[in-house]
Image (tube, helix red, strand yellow):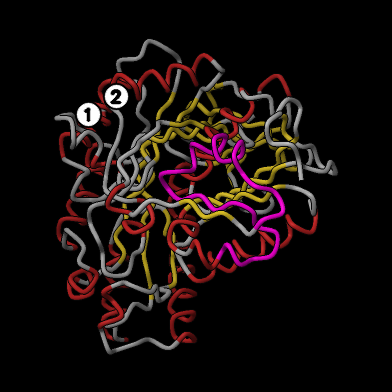
């Protein structure tokens, strides 16, 4: 084990699982460690510390976390192994028993990692430091850059909704955020670092500002007032919090892109009630129609969960018909997974695992159909596209303002640059639209 009183030039390896919020938080933790003298371990180098930021949205997510911990322990057998994130908050004792784990940090402790590393006792049983979820009040804005060109800005954390299938409120605590001034400052720092596109992320971002008299709409307007060549995208936002005034504003915005991601979860009111969602399908349909009436070319992504308790075959079929009727661009399909401590376990009617998979397959096919139709409706149209660093052989990809993936011949001078293009037909893999020459 390393001498944790001296961090200068010590090497750290990071592994992040789950949502973009986790990636933003890992980036903030990495910045703290870098300021203290840590350097990021390169491929093949032995790390002195490994930090694993975990997810716990399903049983599969838990399993992937355990696998990642074991793999990192094999790759870096002498490193201090730190595990944090949602899985660490929900099941700290379970994680502490995994071979190689030295330190387990909960939701309130993750950003104090340096303090715990300074004081850790080497060659001792794993230390567990967590705070009861009702005591978690800290919020720290954070921003990360992915391996392409986008930055992800954490504007909110926690959730007050307690949907019957979900453990996030138990893993992340109550809804909270910084104020608008602090959040905009974080965006300005990203722009100064070269950000051309920033995605606003959180657990329930529409709840931004509720504790200090501000609102998510106020935040959107503050971002739109920034005098810089930058694009903002709103990540997943609850349909009941996506107000008509926000939709109206985005339709004429300078910086907020015509791209929405709205969780539906089920296309029947009966299942929405079982889930304890805060809207019905009529409200959801209104939001989609409102967006499309003002922004006909807007991209709309939709979350759906299949196979929850109480979702009969008839209700699933009704949900499919409703989803098919919506003018949307893509589905993100999640298969229900039982989570300990959730109210949905009180519902007796259960859906067999094989049936859940079948329903997932059906909706994935519907998603492919929706995405194909949306993309083909965009051919011949002209948009600004932000080119990314990743490339497929001789071609590079980028996204238009309305989130259509475009492809052109690779040119390193175009990376992280915006170019006005006209969309042509499909590329060979039908994964993007080529640009017209």
Residue in the picture at 18% in, 30% down: 212
Residue nearer the viewer, 335 or 62: 62
Please indicate whether residue 2 sits to the left or right of residue 152 in the image: right
Residues packed near mark 2 inside 10 Å, few (<14), some (14 to 19) or many (20 plus): some
Q: Which quadrant is the C terminus positioned in?
A: top right
Q: Which mark is residue 111?
A: none
**Residue toward you, 278 or 96:** 96
**Element at label 1:** helix
105 to 178, vertically: above or below: below
Question: Can you say whether 343 is above or below 180 in the image?
Answer: below
- The x, y position of residue 322, in whole percent, is 26, 68
Circle 2 — which element? loop
Closer to the camera in the image, 404 or 136? 136
Does the magenta segment cover residue 89?
no
Which residue is outermost to the right? Answer: 44
Q: Residue 75, position in %: x, y?
A: 80, 54
Could you tell me if the residues under marks 1 and 2 are in contact, i.e. CB atoms within 8 Å? Answer: yes
Residue holding disc 2: 253
Q: Which mark is residue 249?
A: 1
Q: Quadrant of residue 48?
A: top right
Q: Position of residue 342 (x, y in %)?
A: 31, 72
In the image, the segment drawn in magenta is: 95-124
Residue appearing at x 50%, y 71% in the figure: 59
Identify whether 135 is placed above or below 365: above
């Amino acid at each position: 084990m390393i001498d944790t009183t001296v961090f200068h030039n010590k090497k750290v390896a990071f592994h992040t699982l789950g949502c973009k919020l986790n990636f933003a938080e890992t980036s903030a933790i990495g910045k703290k460690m870098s300021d203290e003298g840590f350097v990021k371990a390169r491929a093949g180098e032995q790390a002195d510390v490994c930090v694993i930021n975990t997810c716990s949205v399903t049983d599969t997510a838990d399993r992937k976390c355990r696998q990642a911990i074991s793999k990192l322990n094999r790759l870096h057998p002498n490193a201090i192994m730190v595990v944090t994130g949602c899985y660490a908050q929900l099941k700290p004792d379970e994680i502490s028993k995994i071979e190689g784990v030295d330190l387990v940090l909960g939701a309130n402790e993750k950003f104090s990692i340096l303090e715990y590393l300074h004081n850790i006792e080497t060659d001792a049983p794993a230390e567990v430091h967590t705070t009861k979820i009702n005591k978690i009040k800290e919020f720290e804005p954070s921003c990360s850059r992915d391996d392409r060109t986008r930055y992800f800005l954490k504007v909110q954390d926690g959730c007050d909704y307690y949907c019957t299938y979900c453990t996030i409120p138990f893993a992340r605590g109550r809804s909270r955020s910084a104020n608008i001034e602090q959040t905009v400052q974080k965006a300005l720092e990203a722009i100064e670092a070269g950000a051309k596109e920033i995605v606003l992320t959180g657990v329930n971002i529409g709840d931004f500002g509720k504790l200090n008299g501000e609102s998510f709409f106020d935040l959107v307007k503050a971002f739109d007032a920034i005098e810089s060549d930058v694009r903002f995208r709103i990540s997943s936002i609850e349909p009941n919090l996506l107000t008509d005034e926000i939709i109206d504003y985005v339709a004429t915005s300078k910086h907020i892109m015509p791209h929405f991601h709205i969780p539906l979860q089920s296309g029947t009111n009966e299942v929405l009630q079982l889930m304890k969602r805060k809207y019905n399908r009529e409200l959801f349909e209104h939001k989609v129609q409102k967006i499309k009436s003002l922004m006909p070319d807007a991209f709309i992504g939709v979350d759906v969960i299949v196979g929850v308790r109480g979702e009969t075959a008839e209700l699933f079929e009704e949900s499919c018909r409703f989803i098919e009727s919506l003018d949307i661009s893509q589905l993100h399909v999640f298969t229900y997974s039982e989570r300990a401590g959730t109210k949905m376990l009180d519902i007796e009617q259960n859906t067999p695992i094989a049936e859940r998979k079948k329903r997932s397959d059906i909706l994935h096919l519907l998603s492919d159909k929706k995405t194909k139709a949306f993309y083909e409706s965009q051919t011949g149209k002209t948009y600004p596209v932000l080119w990314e660093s990743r490339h497929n052989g001789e071609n590079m990809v980028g996204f238009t303002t309305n989130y259509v993936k475009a492809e052109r011949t690779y040119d390193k001078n175009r990376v992280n640059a915006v170019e006005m293009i006209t969309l042509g037909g499909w590329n060979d893999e039908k994964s993007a639209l080529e640009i017209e020459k």
